[in-house]
Image (cartoon, helix red, strand yellow):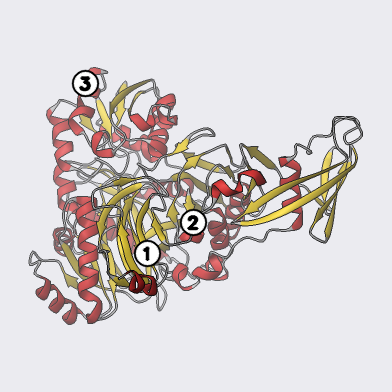
Amino acid sequence: MFDTILIANRGEIACRVMETAQAMGVRCVAVYSDADAGAKHVAMADRAVHIGGSSPSESYLKGDVIIQAALDTGAQAIHPGYGFLSENPDFVEAVVAAGLVFIGPSAKAIRAMGLKDAAKALMVEAGVPVVPGYHGDNQDDGFLAGQADEIGFPVMIKAVAGGGGKGMRMVESASGFQEGLDSARSEAKTAFGNSDVLIEKFVTQPRHIEVQVFGDGTKAVHLFERDCSLQRRHQKVIEEAPAPGMTPEVREAMGQAAVRAAEAIGYAGAGTVEFIVDGSGGLSADGFYFMEMNTRLQVEHPVTEAITGVDLVAWQLRVAAGEDLPMRQDALTIDGHAFEARLYAEDVPKGFLPATGTLTHLAFTDQTRADSGVRAGDTISPFYDPMIAKVIVHGPNRDVALARLRAALAGCEVAGTVTNLAFLGALASHDGFVRGEVDTGLIARDIESLTAAPEVAARHIVVAGMAALDLLEPMAEAGFTLWRPLRRQVLLARDGEEQMLKVRVLSPLVQLWTLGDHEVKAERIKGRWQVDGQPAPHVVKAGGIVTVFDGYGLAFDVIDPLDRAAGAQGDGNLIEAPMPGLVRSVTAKVGQTVSQGDKLAVLEAMKMEHALLAARDGVIAEVLAAAGDQVEAGAALIRLEPADDAEVAA
C-alpha cells in the first residue's frame, strides 16, 4: 500500500478520498488554487501545495504542475477524483512516465471509452446492446441532418467527448435540427475542446440506469445498478440504488453486459457503465442500451457503497497498489435501499442559475451522510461547481429510505446563499417518484409544481422579526427598562416584498406582534418560544439577513428604510449578468429590434452556458460587453429601449 498519495482535485471529492485514505494510514497531499487557499480539503490534508490561479485552466487542469507537486512531496500515486483531469489519457501517461501510479484505469482504457462514437463501436463488438444512431466521423451539417432523418425524430445530439449533460441537445423535428446542432457544438467546444457530435434515437420514455463496475485490468465485477433518471437538463438530481422495478433477470443481464464492457478494454479501478432504458413497458432484458462509460469514480457512488457495504475508494487504493479484486461477484449482495440528493447553491426561481455566497450556517441531521467540500464560513466560488453537499440516506427498503431522505432534506440548514433544497424536498414527495414511476422527463413535466415557492406563514415572519430585533433571548424586565422601548418595529423583505412588523413587549416571556391587521402572539413556555401556537423554528442571523429553518430555509432581508434608495434596481431596461462569468458570445447589435425571449448573449459560468434573453420587446440601445469579457454579477451587458423611444430619437 502507498504511504502518500496526492489528490488532484478539490472540494467534496477531495475530502471524500482523504477520509478513506487517512483512515487506511495513507498520508494525503492536497493541491489548491488561489480561490481555495482556505478550503476544507486543504485543511484536511496532511500537506497542501499551491498550484496556481483561481480558474481551473490556471490550476486544477495543469497536469505538469500537479505531477511535480506529487514528486516534490514524496507521493507515490495520484488520485484524480472526478472531473478536471480524471479522464484525460495524456495526464495518465504523464503520471506513469514520472514514475507514479495513477489511481484509475489505463490511458488506453480511457481513450477507448473517451469518444462516444468509438466506444459504441467497441461495445457492439463486445456484445453490448447500443441505441440506433450515427457514430461516424462525417461532421458535415447536411450529412448529419440526413442521418437524423433516417434515424427518425426525436433524436439526441451528443458531444462525442466528455459528459455531464454538456453538449447535448434533444431535437424534436427537422426544422430545429440546425439550431440544436450549433448549440451542442458550441457547448461541447467550450467544455471539452472538441465540437464533434454523434446522433442517436431518443427513447421517448427513457430511464437512466447505470451499473457500477470494478476491474483489476483483467477481470471485473459489478456492484449492481443505480437509477439516475431524475434529471434536469441532463444533470442528475436524485439518484437511488437499487433501481425501482428491477427484476433479477434484468439485473443479471445489465450487470453482465457492464462486465463485458469493462473486460473488453482491460479496465482497472472503479467505473460506471451507463444504460438508457426504455421504461414505457416496464424493465426487460432486451430493453436497455449502452450509452457511455465513465472511466472514473462517479458523483453518485455513495448509494452503491450504502447498499453493498463496500468502500469504493478503499478498493481503488488497494487495486492500484497491486492487490487483486477484493471480492468475487458471488460474494456481493444488496442490503436495503439508498438515495443521494445533490444540494446546490442554485436560484431555482431564476431558472436554476448557479449562485455564489458565503455560507454563514451549514448543518445536517445526525442520521444523514453528508459528503461536502465546504463548511460554515466558506464561500461558494464562481470558478467551480456550486455543489454544497451530497445528502445520502439508507434504509431497509425503498419506502423507509425515501422517508429518511425527506427528513434529511427538511433537516438541512443552509444560510448565506440560495439553494435547491425546496426543489429537492418537492421531488422527494412527488407522487410518481414515491411510487417508483421514474423517467428522465418527470421533472420537466411537473416543473411548475416542483418549483413552487414555499409557503411563508405569519409565524415565519414573526420569528424573523424576533431575530432581527434580538428578542429571541429573554432578558430580565425586557420592555420595562428605561433603555428598552415597550414598542418596536422592523422592516423585512423577502423576494422583493416588504413587510413592516410592530411588536409590543408585554413581559420577558410574552410579545404581541402586528403584521398589517393580523396579530400574532409569541410566548416562551418551558424555555422555548411558541409563535402563533406552534414551536418556533430554528433561526440564524448573519449580517442583514435572517434565515428561518422551516420550509427548507426562508431568508429575510432586514431593511433599513434609510438605505432603500441605495438598493434601487433601475427601470428594467438593462440586461445584467445574473452571476459572475465569462461572456461567451453577444448576438445583440445596436439598433436591432428584438422581441421578448430573443437570445441576446451567452454567459458561461460554473461550467455551463446560460442564454440571456430579452425581457420585453424593444430596440438595442447599447451593447456594453463583448465576447471574452469576464464580468461580475449585476454587470450591465445590454441596454434596451422601447421601440417608440428609438423612433423619436431617430
User: Foreground residue, 153 or 635?
Assistant: 635
Q: How many marks?
A: 3
Query: Which mark lies nearer to you, 3 or 2?
Result: 2
Is residue 158 depicted above or below 201 in this figure?
above
- Residue 165 seen in the figure: yes
Is residue 253 depicted above or below 477 in this figure?
below
Q: Residues within 10 Å of mark 1 (few under 14, many from 20)?
A: many
Q: Is residue 187 left or right of residue 454?
A: left
Q: Residues within 10 Å of mark 3 (few under 14, many from 20)?
A: some
- Residue 275 seen in the figure: no
Residue 71 is labelled as: 3
Question: Which residue does the numbered mark 1 point to in the structure image?
Answer: 640
Q: Is residue 116 left or right of residue 395?
A: left
3 and 1 marks in contact (CB < 8 Å): no
Q: Quadrant of the C terminus?
A: bottom left
Kindly identify the amino acid type of the residue bearing the numbered disc 2.
Answer: Gly
Secondary structure under tag 2 reads: loop
Question: Which residue does the numbered mark 2 point to in the structure image?
Answer: 570
Q: Position of residue 638 (x, y in %)?
A: 34, 58
Query: Which mark lies nearer to you, 3 or 1?
Result: 1
Kindly identify the amino acid type of the residue bearing the numbered disc 3.
Answer: Leu
User: Foreground residue, 222 or 104?
Assistant: 104
